[in-house]
Image: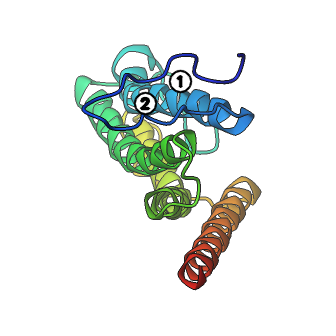
Amino acid sequence: MIGYQSKQAPLVAGLSPAPTKRYSPMTRFASIMAAATSIGIVAVLLFGPVLWLVFVDQPVGAMGEVYENADFTMTDRLLGAGVALVGAVIRAYGLLGLRTTFLEARDGRPLSVASIHGLRRFARVEAIMVLVGALQAGLYGAIATAANDAVQNELAIRFGSAEAGALFIALLLTFAAQVMAEGQKAVQENAAFV
């Protein structure tokens, strides 16, 4: 049958067979998203540092201006990669929580304690990443201006509409995780009455 596991576990010492696992659209989607999140974690950890170490040739300021006649030294590249790696590790920590949420949903436990904690962790980390991202952009600008003799020691930290939108979405996810926690409490209370 399509949508159901076709094989049953054999009987062991008089025990009943293991229940068949039903695959719903939610479990399929959760499985795909768990795999995509795992790939995303690796990509997040590699992208920023590799970009700084290999591909960045010319310094760009915090506002997108290119500084001509300036070259990055290996120290500048290592500093940039370090700043990128700090943000990447923080974001990967949040993505691990999201992956837990997807894995729990895949296994038929979308309202489990682990699932809710995973979503809360992801939402909180994303809220923190708004501030970390603004600080990172400022540090990238400072690294870029250190490589330019014409402009020295510029540190520009910005918080614009993109950052405000990201913060709003992170707070919305925090609220959704709280709603899930309340749903879990209601399920537990109903189970206690039965």
What amino acid does circle 2 point to? Answer: Gly
Foreground residue among 27 and 39 = 27
Mark before the other along the chain sequence, 2 or 1: 2
Q: In which quadrant of the rendered image does the C terminus lie?
A: bottom right
The relative height of residue 79 versus residue 68 in the rendered view (above or below) is below
Which residue is depicted at the point 39% across and 39% down? 84
Left/right of residue 104 with respect to residue 25 in the rendered view: left
Foreground residue among 53 and 141 = 53
What's the mark number on residue 68? Answer: 1
Mark 1 packing: few (<14 Cα in 10 Å), some, or many (20+)?
A: few
Mark in the foreground, 2 or 1: 2
The relative height of residue 111 versus residue 83 in the rendered view (above or below) is below
What's the mark number on residue 48? Answer: 2
Foreground residue among 17 and 166 = 17
Colouring rule applied to residues: rainbow
x, y percentage for residue 140?
44, 42
What amino acid does circle 1 point to? Answer: Glu
x, y percentage for residue 158?
61, 59
Q: Can you tell which quarter of the image residue 77 is in?
A: top left
Residue 156 in sight:
no
How many dots with numbers?
A: 2
x, y percentage for residue 75?
23, 31
Label 2 – label 1 distance at C-alpha = 22 Å
Foreground residue among 85 and 55 = 85
Mark 2 packing: few (<14 Cα in 10 Å), some, or many (20+)?
A: some
What's the mark number on residue 5? Answer: none
Residue 161 in sight:
yes
